[in-house]
Image: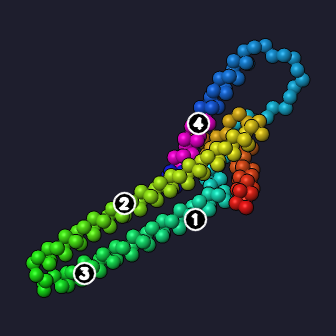
Amino acid sequence: MKTTASTLTKFTLGILIAGSIAACNQNKTADKPAATTAPTEVKEAIVYVNSDSLLNKYDYFKDMSKRLEDKGKSSQGDLQAKGQAFQREVAEYQKNAATLPADQRQSTEQRLARKQQELQGYQQNANAEFQNAQATENAKLYDKIADFTKGYAKEKGYKLVLTYSKANPTVLYGDPSLDVTADVVKRLNEAYAKDKK
């Protein structure tokens, strides 16, 4: 889904900007002399989520895709039925055109031309409605993942959560120990299951 990839790209860009700001703020404090304290455990501050795996395993995304697919099939079926009815009318007219008086042929042709324009307008409206529904669903998906990730990062002490996708490889390599996808998917699905009830 191209829109989802675009949304996730914007999400990644936002995270990268936030990470850059956090890194700049860390450098300012690094210039100050450090207080003598006992060594603490170093925890990775940057992790990544494989967005391909996330989307393939996230139940909300699966349900969302099914809803959109059903809506698309319904819309397509409706358009197909209207198109076939129009084609039958045109075929009926063509079959009888030779026997019709000139004024009746002209009025029928005008009526069929109007119907064709209406059908084209209906198709454009249906396509626009589907695209709006898709955009709305993708925005909800983005918000769910972004909100969850924000809380997840805070809970785990991560400063930056990147996203990785083969379709849009902004991260070329990430050590597998930094991949938190499985935990994120598990917890997102748990949260979604609770929301569904």
Residue shown at the point (69%, 18%) measured from the top left: 28
Label 3 or label 4, whichever lies nearer to me, is 3
Q: Nearer the viewer, residue 46 or 99?
A: 99
How far from the left and from the top, in percent, is residue 12? 59, 40
Dot 2 or dot 4, earlier in sequence: 4
- The three-letter amino acid code for the residue at tag 1 is Lys
Q: CA distance from mark 3 to mark 4?
A: 56 Å
How far from the left and from the top, in percent, is residue 182? 73, 52
Q: CA distance from mark 3 to mark 2?
A: 24 Å
Dot 1 or dot 2, earlier in sequence: 1
Please determine whether, in this image, residue 181 is positioned above or below residue 59. above
- The three-letter amino acid code for the residue at tag 3 is Ala
Dot 3 or dot 4, earlier in sequence: 4
Q: Which mark is residue 14?
A: 4
Disc 3 designates what residue?
Answer: 91
Q: Secondary structure under badge 1?
A: helix
